[in-house]
Image: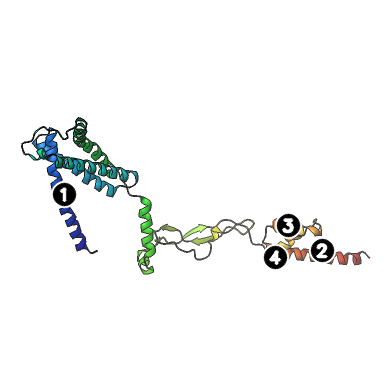
Amino acid sequence: MNRKAKAALVLALVAVVGMAFRVSWNALRDVAKAIGADGTAATLYPFVVDGLMALALVAALTLTGDARRFALRVLAAYTLASLVLNYVHGLLPELHSESIGWSRLADGDVTNWALVLLATSLPVGSIYFGSDLVAKVLHHRPAVESIEHESTQTNVNRSSGELGELVVEEAIEPPVSVPALAPVLADPIDVVETRVPIAAAEVTRPRRATGRVPVAARSPRPIRTPEELLSEARSITKSWPIEDLTGEAIRKALRTSPAKARVLRETLKAERTAHAATAPAVVS
C-alpha cells in the first residue's frame, strides 16, 4: 500500500471515530446530568470515558507483555461501560429532555444503584488507570536484543560492496622496537620490529587471521637439531631396557613430537641390536 492510500485510510478512520464519539457524547452527557452533574461536568463527562478508551488503545500499541495486557483490559472495561450507559440512555426517553435534572437510571432499586455506581466510578477510574498507563508508557524501553538482531540482519543482507564502504581503515603508528621474549637456553635477546596498533575503528565483519605468528607469541622452547635429540635420547634411555624403548615413552621424556619420537626409537633399537651383535666378537 502506497503512502497516499495509507493517509486516506487514516483520515477515514479519524472521521469514523469522530462521528462515533459525537453519538456517544450525547448519551454520556445526558447520563451525567441524570446522576447530578452540572452543565460543565456533563459536557466533560464523555471525554473522561471515551477519552480513556483512546488512551488505552495507544498504550496497548506501545507497550509489550503484561503492561500491554493491562492496557487491553482497561480498554475492554471502559468500552463495556460506555456501551452499558449508551444502552441505558436509549431505554429511557426522559433522559433526552433538555430540562432533565436528577433522575433514576432504572426502575429497580438494585439496578439503579448499580448503574449510578458505574456512572460515578468511571471518572475516578479514569484518573487511576490513565495515570498508570501514562507512567507505563513513559518508562517503557524497547528490547535491546531485537534492535541488535535487526542491525545484524541488515548487515547480513547487504552486499560486499556496501559492507566495504563501511569499513574504516585502522590508524597505525610507525613501527616501534619491542624486545622479544628470551628463549630458554638460546642466544641473547634479539630486538625485533613489531607494529603496535594504537587505535582501530570498528569493523562491520570479522577479519581472518593472516600472516605469520609474531616472534613474541611463539613458544620459548629452543629448536633442537636431530643430532641433539639423538644425543639427549641416548643419555636419558641409557639405563632403560630395550622393552621400554617405545615411542610414547621417548616422546614424554624428551617432550618432542610423536614422529620424531618414533625415529629416535628405531635408531636406539638399531644401535642396541648392533651393539649386542658385536659384543661377543669384542670379548673374544
Q: Residue at x 18, y 60 (%)?
A: 8
3D distance between C-alphas at marks 3 and 1: 93 Å
3D distance between C-alphas at marks 1 and 4: 97 Å
Q: Residue at x 50, y 57 (%)?
A: 178
Name the N-terminal-most of marks 2 and 1: 1
Name the N-terminal-most of marks 2 and 4: 4
Regarding mark 3 in the picture, which secondary structure is present there? helix
Contact, mark 2 vs mark 1 (Cβ under 8 Å): no
Mark 1 belongs to which amino acid? Ala
Q: Position of residue 61 (x, y in %)?
A: 27, 50
Mark 4 belongs to which amino acid? Pro
Name the one closer to the observer, 160 or 68.
68
The answer to whether one can see residue 115 in this image is yes
Q: Which residue is mark 3?
A: 249
Point out the frontmost of discs 2 and 4: 2
Q: Position of residue 154 (x, y in %)?
A: 36, 61
Quadrant of the rendered image containing residue 94: top left
3D distance between C-alphas at marks 3 and 2: 17 Å
Point out the frontmost of discs 1 and 4: 1
Mark 3 belongs to which amino acid? Ala
Q: Which residue is mark 2?
A: 272
Q: Position of residue 84 (x, y in %)?
A: 20, 41
Name the N-terminal-most of marks 4 and 3: 4
Contact, mark 1 vs mark 4 (Cβ under 8 Å): no
Instruction: In the rendered structure, find residue 226 and report the number of the disc placed on it.
Output: 4
Name the N-terminal-most of marks 3 and 1: 1
Q: Residues within 10 Å of mark 2 (few under 14, many from 20)?
A: few
Q: Position of residue 284 (x, y in %)?
A: 94, 65
Mark 2 belongs to which amino acid? Arg
